[in-house]
């Protein structure tokens, strides 16, 4: 199995609401208004929004409705960009888990939680290389 | 907020077990044996394994221990590759949610569940472009 991820699917309760939230963050999709899955091209992978019940069935998972031990992160080039995205997410309807602050690992980060309870850490990590294409590289 | 993901962190109960599982799938890390986070460079993003309790706290999430509405997928170039990875995952200790089979969306996929309950769909989608670098592209 190659060391890569092709697709991250987020289960949602209300696809229209979820789509609007990510669009309010500036994301764009070619999905039609009545598509039952919304795909976003996110660099070399795809982020999808799909009904959580359908995703649970398709993934052969039981579902009690909570968080499941997966957190996504979005790295940026400065603490100021962390703060700006946390503000943008709040304006789009996210819950702010924690505002931007210095992190125990030597960077700066904050957390927003999307309308379906999926957390995103927005982080500035000065030890990771952030490419112009948005890719991140661990130190050599 | 740019349309990209930098890091996917999977919360785990036993970091050594989780690391061994992904290494048994062929993944490699530069993490030291006693590091408390294990990072895998996965194309232009990073996949991390970290204690689920620590991840919950850091993500400002409550945790009832179940699945949380997030499924990862790994796309490959043929149905035979789907079957091979599902077999490999079973050999590495995964639970097989469903064996490879034709999917309702016109491709072929199976699901394995890692030792911490995180599902991975292994998929062949003939309508998506799989790059030589492992990136996936939605149709134009």
Image (cartoon, coloured by chain):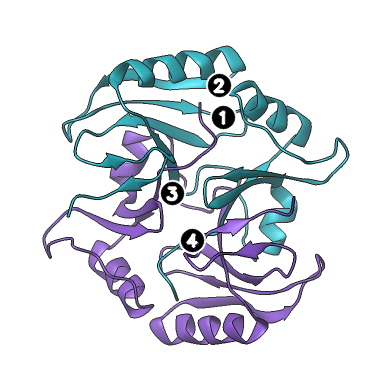
Chain colours: A cyan, B purple
Category of crowding for the residue at label 3, using alpha-carbon neighbours closer than 10 angstroms: few (below 14), some (14–19), many (at least 20) = many
Are dots 3 and 2 on a single chain?
A: yes
Category of crowding for the residue at label 1, using alpha-carbon neighbours closer than 10 angstroms: few (below 14), some (14–19), many (at least 20) = many
Q: CA distance from mark 3 to mark 2?
A: 19 Å
Residue for badge 4 = B118
Can you see residue B137?
yes
Q: CA distance from mark 3 to mark 1?
A: 15 Å
Residue for badge 1 = A114
Residue placed at 38% from the left, 77% from the top?
Answer: B25
Sequence-wise first label, 2 or 1:
2
Place of residue B101 in the rendered image (x, y in percent of width and height, measured from the top left): 73, 81
Can you see residue B60?
no
Q: CA distance from mark 2 to mark 4?
A: 25 Å
Are dots 2 and 1 on a single chain?
A: yes
The circle drawn on residue A69 is 3
Q: Quadrant of residue A29?
A: top right
The reply to whether callout 4 and callout 3 are in contact (CB within 8 Å) is: yes
The reply to whether callout 2 and callout 1 are in contact (CB within 8 Å) is: yes
Residue placed at 58% from the left, 23% from the top?
Answer: A25
């Amino acid at each position: 199995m190659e060391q890569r991820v092709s697709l991250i699917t987020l289960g949602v309760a209300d696809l229209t609401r979820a789509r609007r939230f990510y669009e309010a963050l500036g994301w764009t999709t070619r999905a039609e208004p009545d598509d039952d899955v919304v795909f976003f091209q996110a660099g070399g992978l795809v982020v999808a929004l799909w009904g959580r019940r359908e995703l649970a069935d398709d993934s052969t998972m039981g579902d009690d409705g909570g968080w499941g031990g997966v957190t996504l992160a979005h790295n940026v080039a400065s603490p100021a960009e962390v703060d700006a995205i946390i503000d943008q997410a709040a304006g789009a309807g996210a819950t702010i888990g924690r505002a931007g602050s210095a992190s125990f690992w030597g960077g700066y980060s904050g957390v927003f939680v999307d309308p379906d309870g999926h957390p995103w850490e927005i982080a500035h990590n000065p030890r990771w290389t952030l490419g112009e294409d948005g890719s991140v590289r661990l130190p050599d």
